Image (cartoon, grey):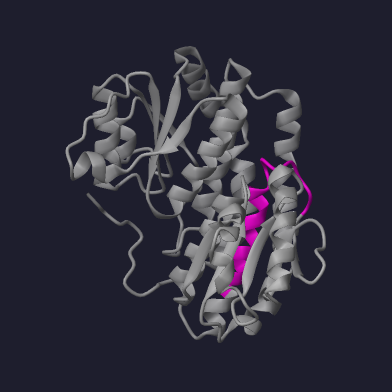
Amino acid sequence: MAADISEQPAGYERLLSSEHAGAIARVAAVIAERRPRHVVFTARGTSDHAALYGAYLTEIRLGLPAGLASPSAITLFGARPDLSDALVVGVSQSGGSPDLAEVLRTARASGALTLAVTNNPESTLAGVAELSVDIAAEHERAVAATKTYTAELLALLMLVEGVRAGDGALPAEERAALAALPELAARTLDDDTPAQLAPRYRFAGQLVTTGRGYAYPTAREAALKLMETSYLPALAFSGADLLHGPLAMTDPDVPVLAVVGSGPGGRSMGEVLPRLGERRADVVVVGSADVAGATRMAVPEVDERYAPLLDILPLQRLALALALARGENPDAPRGLKKVTATM
């Protein structure tokens, strides 16, 4: 897991190379030409959080309604929704889950434009889709996904921005901003704060993660990583939902990991953090600025669209360090396999 985490800056650089960026641009151009009226994502596990990020990008940057499909509606209940005007995107590291392939197969039969975003271009998912994007993360060693998750995020970002451009090609300003990500990611991973924090939560009984907008998928992915590797019950809430009841469970014995960016989503957390302070919660903020009363895992300040590619890095390192501090093996979580087949 440590090796996988450390390879993410190189993964960003690889995906941004002319070879892979050009392939994504060609797919984006096809989507732009087809002009879908709405976008449906389907995914499981970690990829579900990447898909949620894709849905935020789609609605905010493209102005198209977007949502996450429930595969069981098709595979268990036999639903056959009319997706003739939709782009249906399957997001999966392995591309091997039968239910996701069935969703794309059914969507394509109804007239949808289908796309597979996967680390295995020879997978079943890629085979049933009309279009395919290779996230080019190379082999991932650990069961818990890290570098494939961030590669999915970057691929979806490049895809959406390519569609927004109209011809698939990223504008020069966008390319320049993305080109800075590998170095920013390397700098983020060099900060040892996550390892220093891990002993503090060695005996924690539960934990809460929170964020809004683009940061919400990060909060959900962080919670999953902690549960997978440390077997620590972790509940993820949007900052808004946290105020609608779950805030009551926070106290000095329930650590809160808050993802706070510098855009609208991060600013809206200004309503949440003081309420956590009232509860005397132990708050750790992931962000580019200090927050009164909270410990900070620092990340560089970037456009809020890009922040999920950096914010998750210290949280991955925290999950790894905490698992080791609790005497667990983060490379082989009990009961889990790299490829999970569901129907």
Q: Position of residue 118 (x, y in %)?
A: 42, 41
Left or right, 309 with respect to 176, comes to left
Residue 316 is a magenta residue: yes
- Report if residue 295 is visible in the image: yes
Q: In this rendering, does residue 19 appear at all?
A: no
Residue 52 to residue 175: above or below: below
Whether 61 is among the magenta residues is: no
**Which image quadrant is residue 121 in?**
top left
Left or right: 245 as drawn, with respect to 266: left
Q: Position of residue 3 (x, y in %)?
A: 56, 64
Query: In the figure, residue 79 lies in which quadrant?
Result: top left
Image coordinates of residue 149 in percent, x first then y, are 51, 51
Considering the whole magenta stretch, tell me its main secondary structure.
helix
Per the rendered image, the range of residues in magenta is: 300-320
Disc tally is 0
Identity of the residue drawn at 18% across and 45% down: 76
Q: Image height check: is 104 above or below 304?
A: above
Extreme residue in the top direction: 33
Residue at image location 44% in from the left, 76% down from the top = 231
For image coordinates 66% across by 40% down, the residue present is 305
Residue at 44% of width from left, 25% of height from top? 38
**Looking at the image, which is closer to me, 47 or 240?**
240
Q: Would you say 298 lies left or right of 211 here?
A: right
- The location of residue 62, given as percent across then percent down, is 58, 25
